[in-house]
Amino acid sequence: MSLRIVVAVKYVPDATGDRHFAEDLTTDRDAVDGLLSELDEYAVEQALQIAEEADDAEITVLTVGPEDAKDALRKALSMGADQAVHVEDDALHGTDALGTSLVLAKAIEHTGYDLVVCGMASTDGTMGVLPAMLAERLGVPQVTLLSEVKVEDGKVTGRRDGDAASEQLEAQLPAVVSVTDQSGEARYPSFKGIMAAKKKKVESLDLSDLGIEEDEVGLAGAWTKVDSAAERPARTAGTIVTDEGEGGKQLAAFLAEQKFI
Amino acid sequence: MSVTLDNALLESEEHRTLRSCVAALGRRYGREYFTAAVRAGRQTDELWREAAKLGYLGVNLPEQYGGGGGGMTELSIVLEELGATGCPLLLLVVSPAICGTVIARFGTEAQRAHWLPGLADGSVRMAFGITEPDAGSNSHRITTTARRDGDDWLLSGRKVFISGVDIADATLIVGRTEDARTGKLKPCLFIVPRETAGFEFRPIPMELAAPEKQFQLFLDDVRLPADALVGDEDAGLLQLFAGLNPERIMTAAFSLGMGRYALDTAVEYARTRQVWQAPIGAHQAIAHPLAQVRIELELAQLMMRKAAFLYDNGDDMGAGEAANMAKYAAAEAGAHAVDQAVHTLGGNGLTTEYGLASLLTASRVGRIAPVSREMILNFVSHHTLGLPKSY
């Protein structure tokens, strides 16, 4: 039987852009171009490698987000995923991690799965809690923050590298895993992958398709609330030491003042 | 929400994706990688191989031979985007664009099966030899001549300014044969493997900072089998022109990529370089010329896309005029971009660190090759405007 892999990905504002909050303190998605979260590219890559090793596997890439989030799905499809699911609903605006995990879990159950692969965190929210929440909602084991992952004989195994130790972990499928940015560089879409992506199926779902009530999600349904947000102050100009014979002494004095030496 | 309109003027989602993917690959290598290769006298093979593996180098070749099934639209995107990151692959102009196109369109089934898979996956490279010391690119004056010897051909002549012959597995040589009926000489294309006896190539010392070298070729009774002749002996001129339009489109892409790289460098500098209170980019004397360059590059790109669109849709005649105009416009825009970028950086524009100075020479290539801008102006005067011919 085919190994069903679902990769949960997020469409985020380009981290190299000038990112801001909107007036309601949600992420401003209009000011900066969006893209597939870089950390989720690692998840897509690992899913592709697992699928290549398996005799028969099918990768569904899943996202929750506005219309433009299709770009993230398209990118994953051009990398080689087989099909996509896009959950889009106006009521989703402002949904927190807990609400997102509910929507993702329902969509994953709707799609059917043996293995869910996530990135270690999103590059915008950077909470990194979603894989654990998903596993809890789905009632399956979680094997998170892996730098190496493999699927064999109905089990998923992997290595989690900590500061002090490396752990070898294993779980029976179905399971949720998350992979780190150490798991291996994501491939670029090939020309054939880019051309094939347009023909691949993208299923669109809304909250009613998933049996979710509007008040369970969105800003109103969120368990966490952003009270205020302040822009980080601009970096102040550094100190420039011009060497006119005393440069070394001035540098040393600066470092001593900052308690570096 | 972004508006999606697909037509010939606006790029499709796939083309935009191709641009961003190629650009991401190019950025990972970057200008440093390119200049280090030039300094060490190395080729940029790592980039070539990785781009090849992703199918970017053979996008224009037929799918049945391992290509991408696209056209010059896609291949010009690949070269332009690599160039915009400071890492152009010059041989794209000749290997897949000219040689791949000519063999795909006019080669025999055996020639296609033999050459195209390698050209498509980048494992085989082919140079292109047309220019001669006494004829320039005037295909009617070419003196490299092939004569029959039994079933074989014997090819003799000289070529000059041929790119990348040392790293190409073979060179597609434009020669002439005697027409059996009229006795007149007509152009013919021959595939000459690099190690063929009598085929000699010598590098020409050039003031170009590029990994690919330029060569003089000496062909002295080079014996070639019958199947070295590409396609139809009687359709040589048509076949030749089929390869020259892609060459002009790709030369435009090369100029555009370089121009964009220079402009990006200048804009970044103008944004961050501060003298007195404001960044220098706040001064209109700096800003306006850069804006002008941007407009020129954008217009030239649009013309290049028109030429590619016409070519890919089988309009060789229409593509000829558009490709010439695109080559001209892109070369001018590219040279202007580099000139203005150097000027924006002042003294820094001539330092090794900022890497713009060597582009002053390189950006002139687009004005000179594969035909000079004066020859393009002749073409437009004569063919487009209907003015009398001067030569």
Image (cartoon, rainbow, N blue to C red):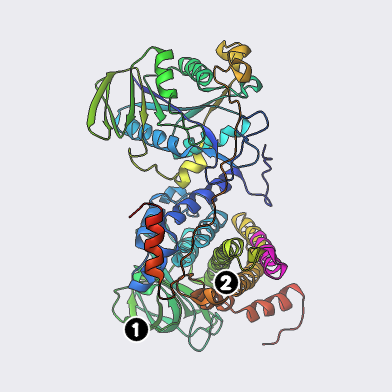
Circle 1 residue: B221
**Please, what is the dominant secondary structure of the magenta stretch?**
helix
Residue A117, quarter of the rendered image: top left
> Please, which chain is the residue tagged with disc 2 on?
B
The quarter of the picture where the N terminus of chain A appears is top left
Q: Is residue A233 above or below residue B328?
A: above
Where does residue A63 sit, x and y in percent of width and height?
52, 27
Query: Could you tell me the amino acid type at mark 2?
Result: Leu
Q: Secondary structure at mark 2?
A: helix
Q: Of residues B323 and B387, which is closer to you in this image?
A: B323
**Other residues around mark 1 within 10 Å, as few (<14) / some (14–19) / many (≥20):** some
Instruction: Tell me which segment is drawn in magenta.
Output: B282-302
Q: Is residue A83 above or below residue A45?
A: above
Q: Is residue B294 above or below residue A51?
A: below
Residue B113 can be seen, yes or no: no
Query: Could you tell me the amino acid type at mark 1?
Result: Asp
Circle 2 residue: B345
